Amino acid sequence: MQLFFNMILVYLGTIGFGILVNVPKRALNMGGIVSVMGWLIYYFYTQYVGGYIEANALGTFSIGIFGIIASRWKKLPVIIFNIPALVPLVPGGQAYQVMKYLATGNYTLAKSYLIQVVFIAGAIAAGFLFSEFANQLFLRLKKKIASKKEVLK
């Protein structure tokens, strides 16, 4: 029941952020679905395998792949789906802790949280990079297979 409730909150949070940044209305629902799919991969990885950095990379990779699929289906730019869908994976809590501990003078804890933020941000960037790489690889393979089929005819 808690998982279902969290999925609804992720969906609504993504749609709310999409409205805030003026995502077209026809893309809001699909953006929410893309976000929930990426968050589920993140959630199950953290629950059953462990590691927030790897979970963020896999969640972002899946958001990138599902965002590409959604953009082709809706005929809209992929960034319209990726940016709002990324909101549940952003390390806002850790960034807040960095600022809090810097303000209170606890530099050791601030440094620890800052390292987490940097690694998670890097994992998010890598996830998008690898999803785009996988997309380009898929398109090239598809093109090669299509050209080989024409040669055989």
Image (tube, rainbow, N blue to C red):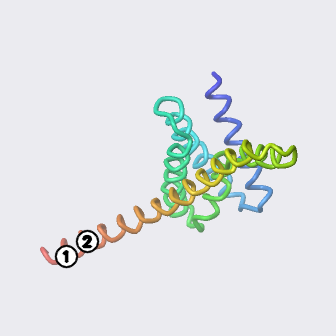
What percent of the width, then of the height, locates residue 28? 68, 53
Q: In percent of the image, x 35 and y 66: which residue is there?
A: 137
Q: How many marks?
A: 2
Residue at 51% x, 56% y is 127
The residue depicted at 54 percent of the width and 52 percent of the height is 60
Vertical order, 81 against 102 (above or below):
below
Residue 25, compared with residue 54, is above or below; it is: below
According to the picture, the residue beneath numbered tag 1 turns out to be 150
Residue at the right extreme of this rendering = 104
Q: Are marks 2 and 1 in contact (CB under 8 Å)?
A: yes
* Residue highlighted by disc 2: 146
Amino acid of disc 2 = Ala
Report the side of 77 relative to 148 (left or right).
right
Residue 124: x and y in percent read: 57, 55
The secondary structure type at the circle numbered 1 is: helix
In the image, 142 versus 131, the foreground residue is 131
Out of 120 and 133, give the one closest to the viewer: 120
